[in-house]
Amino acid sequence: MSKLKFAYYLAGGCAGCDTSLLDTGEKLLEFLDNVEITFFAPTIADFKYEDPEKLPPKSIDFGFVTGNIRNEEHEKIAKVMREKCKVLIAFGICASCGGVKGLSALFKDEEILQKVYGKEWKSLLSGEVPKLKRARALDDVVEVDYYVGGCPPSREHIEKIFKTIIDGSLPPKGSWLTMGKAVCDVCPRNPILKGKKKKQITQVKRFLDVPKEDECLLEQGYLCLGAVTQGDCGARCTKANVPCRGCGGPIPGVRDFGTKAISAIATSFEDISFLKKIPSSVHLFYRYSLVKSLPMILKEKLGERK
Amino acid sequence: MAKNVGVVFCTCGGKLKEKIDFDSVKDYLKEVEGIKEVVITDDLCVSPYEKLSCLKGKVDGIVFGGCSERSSLKFNEDMIEKTLVSLGIDPSFYEVVNLREQCFYIHDDLEGIDRKIKDSFSMALEKLRSNIPSYKEKIKEKVLIVGGGIAGQRCAQALADLGIESTIVEEKPYLGGKGLEVALFWQSESSPSFCTTDCVVPVVGRDTLLRKEKIKVLTSSQVVDVEKKEGKFVVKIERKPLYVDPNKCVSCGECSKVCPVEVPNPYNLGKTKIKAIDKPLPLAIPDYYTIDDEACTKCGKCEEVCPQNAINLNAKEETITEEFGSVVIATGFTSYDMKVFENLSYGEEGVLTLREFERYLANGLFKESPKEVSFVLCLKDKVGYCSKITCNIVIKQAFLLKRNNKNVKVRIFAKELRTTGRAFEEFRRRAKKLGVEFIKEAVEKVERKEGKLEVATTNSIYTSDLVVLAEPLVPQQVKISKMLDLQLDKFGFPLEFQPRVINPLETFVKRVFVIGGAKGFKDVQESIESALGGAVRVYKALKGERKKYYSTIDQDKCSRCETCLSCCPHGAITITKDEKVFIDPSLCRGCGLCYPPCPSKAIRFNNLEDEQILRMAKVAFRNLEKGKPRVLAFLCYWCAYGAADLMGIKHKEKLPENFRTIRIRCSASLSLDVIAKIFEEDLADGIVVAGCPVANCHHVFGNYMQERRIEAFKEMLELMGVKNKVVRWEYIGVPQGKKLAKAIREVLKALEVENVKA
């Protein structure tokens, strides 16, 4: 049997997904027995952006794009990937929903650049630097066949995805590659495991002290988003005593992660005054999905940018 | 699904024709596929069956256009459902276009009205076509009555007389409850006189046992677990070992004679002695001897002498599992722990509670009869509520003491004495006449000094040989209420289901009722009133309801996050033994509170799904002129929609025609997802969501929940600078039509301003 042709591109990302991919270790080697890498850039393997451009359309069986689309270069290569790949997978929450870097949309580029590079940012960034564009998810630029959440996707999750691809058992196009249930379902703190009902949130705590190890974080007042987040991570954060921040992305069927998060959290509050106790709601609810969120879309429709 | 739709207009005696062009609407409907029949009548409410008989067998769903299904005094939704059933149509398959209250009375522009009606018909059709059949509750026709006091028994008797089986579970070895503690009951409000317990309690008890085909009595038993399962309450009852067979024992007392062990009698607060096998009180019913398990040495003497062979000392504790369709809580009340009030010296000899005093008096437990008796009231400010019957009990006792012995000095210490109604005022007058002293001073301290008790008030010190502290009463059903997941008030009494003023015995959990003292302090007569009323409510509830709106859960999708569990006010969502979340449609009240927050979209809210609302929203402004702002008002089933119905009729409000209303089950049954989608797809510009006023939600906290969600969502829109889409929350009670009209008007206005700017 001929090997499946595989391509991988890191756009506006931190290479965390690449690292997680490598973390699969032996499974990666097994995977590589079954696939042939036709393109992998800019990390890990030695390929040039021109390489895939030379290939005929749809000649690659499947491609992963990680990171969001933040500049002209990302957009250009993403389009090449789309053209050459039969199946295109948004790999990780940045490609799927814009990721944490999507929060840049809250500011003007000039503000960010000045903050990072100082007053001289204009002269520093002249020359060959690709032009910035507002942060977008992959499917804002090209059609995406599958979505994978996670920042980054966990090793176990990636291994399952390998298996799905090799077995040819991908779900209908447009789906998330996920086990389909929330972090709560796999979280050892879930009160249901003790036959108990989850208590209302009677206080809002910031994650500055150490939570109790065996109690639901939300019950303790830490605004854990486990209930609204895909649990393919195996509840990694809550097992490490850290509230879930939603990197897994929305449960299939949910259109807007942040809006669902508001629904679930505001519902569980004991009192409306708690809303004011959230240090920054937008960072809590839309941390990884702002660019795909409804308020953002409406803002874009208005053509206004703060 | 309704495939063949009938449309029925009513012109309200021709009145609606003044503003509504029914022919134009009829022409419009001709274009719509699937409409089989259109009926126009002037007075549907006068003879609905006659008017609609032409539809029988031809249509499987009806859109009514006429008066409000919520507020119509002649043809509201209950009448509609009844009519549908007579036509052989499932009661889920109807929708109403509110022509009268929410169109005719609030609008004047004829073209605007015409457009609004056409859109409203399209909305109703979209909804109707996506409805599914109603759910018929499956109910087990058997009732659990927790507590065998007088209320519990009278309720069981009434049910038996209606043909309904019940099981009474009573912790004590005998029936009678609090009633047994009191020697003399006051009679009725009309008559300041007494009935004796010795007479009344056996009368009630025998009446219970007489109906043994229908009433099962489990004494010395306790409910230890309740599992809700497919409309049933699966109840685990633990029964102490039944050493003496009540069916064989004839209460000859031979066993007691030979029993070598003496124990304090709990019935008399341990002040008298009985044998380990005995009857705690001679009139105890069921009439059989019981054994104190802890004290009995199992010597076997009683077994030997029993002429009836009724005793088996090897009997074991029993666990009984029974299924019920309804639960009646009749657990009564108990006394506040008076040790908390250290200044009152409770526990000191001669300081008793009112309930203890009743037993002392009835059994002559005093070493010598007291010559100076002080009654001390009241602790309502300390505990936060008035126990209602306590002042009356005090005045009864004071009167009796004085009547029976003129030489006793009786003082009542109370800043104010609440002797209610006719009988108790009479008791107070008589007590006063007999010389009972009323001291209107607050008691600061009770203490024993040099052999005498002293009652210190703000002004003075009084001596006494007996101080009776009128203890606050406290609810006694918290354990069973927790098992059933009832909503309790802050003192532990079950909250009544809304509208509570007309549902005094219903709890928030379907088919669970509370009667007697368990739902608030009552005397015996009042307790029985509620017991008899409760029986009728139970009888009705057992018939089962057909419901259009109810939630179900898809286990394949559920992530068990329990978000729904914490927001179901009706105890309809439970955790199963295999750690799954289950929604019981037979217990669901169809409020939809669980639906919007479900993060996994595992819950279906049948007949009011997000997709249905979106289908309605898609056609809601199809006929509206371009450029006009579009406002959708989502109104809760009872309060806000009721207010909208009265905007014109009562408050004479006039509003622009470019808003549409959608009646939802509870304000909190509307998802933010729907609001988001409506904005995203540009189906409307403004959304008003209105729910019941503060402290009045039919589902306890739905209104608060929705306000929180909307405010959080609004904050996000504002942060992004979104101004051409507006969402607004309002608390609206039925009489607040003006407030609702103002909110709608303001949202329309704000959007107009934005339109101009753009």
Image (spheres, coloured by chain):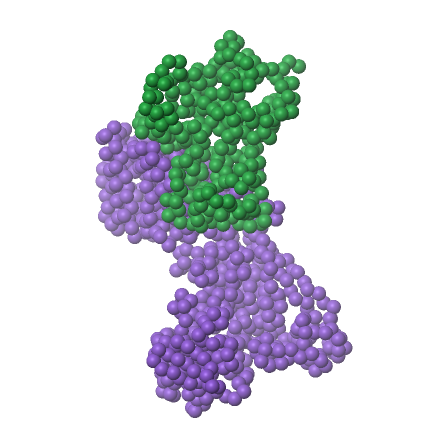
Chain colours: A green, B purple
In the rendered image, is residue B315 in sight? Answer: yes
Residue at the farthest right position: B304
Q: Is residue A191 above or below residue A108?
A: below
Residue at the farthest bottom position: B407
Q: Nearer the viewer, residue B68 or B569?
A: B569
The quadrant holding residue B381 is bottom left
Q: Residue at x 58, y 15 (%)?
A: A37
Q: Residue at x 47, y 70 (%)?
A: B340
How far across and how far down the image is residue A216, in percent?
Answer: 52, 46
Q: Residue at x 58, y 53 (%)?
A: B227
Count of marks, rendered view: 0
Q: Nearer the viewer, residue A161 or B65?
A: A161
How far across and how far down the image is residue B391, in percent?
Answer: 41, 75
Position of B748 with respect to B198 (left or right) is left
Q: Is residue B38 above or below residue B387?
A: above
Position of A53 with respect to B755 (left or right) is right
How far across and how far down the image is residue B393, in percent?
Answer: 44, 77
Q: Residue at x 77, y 77 (%)?
A: B304
Q: Nearer the viewer, residue A1 or B170?
A: A1
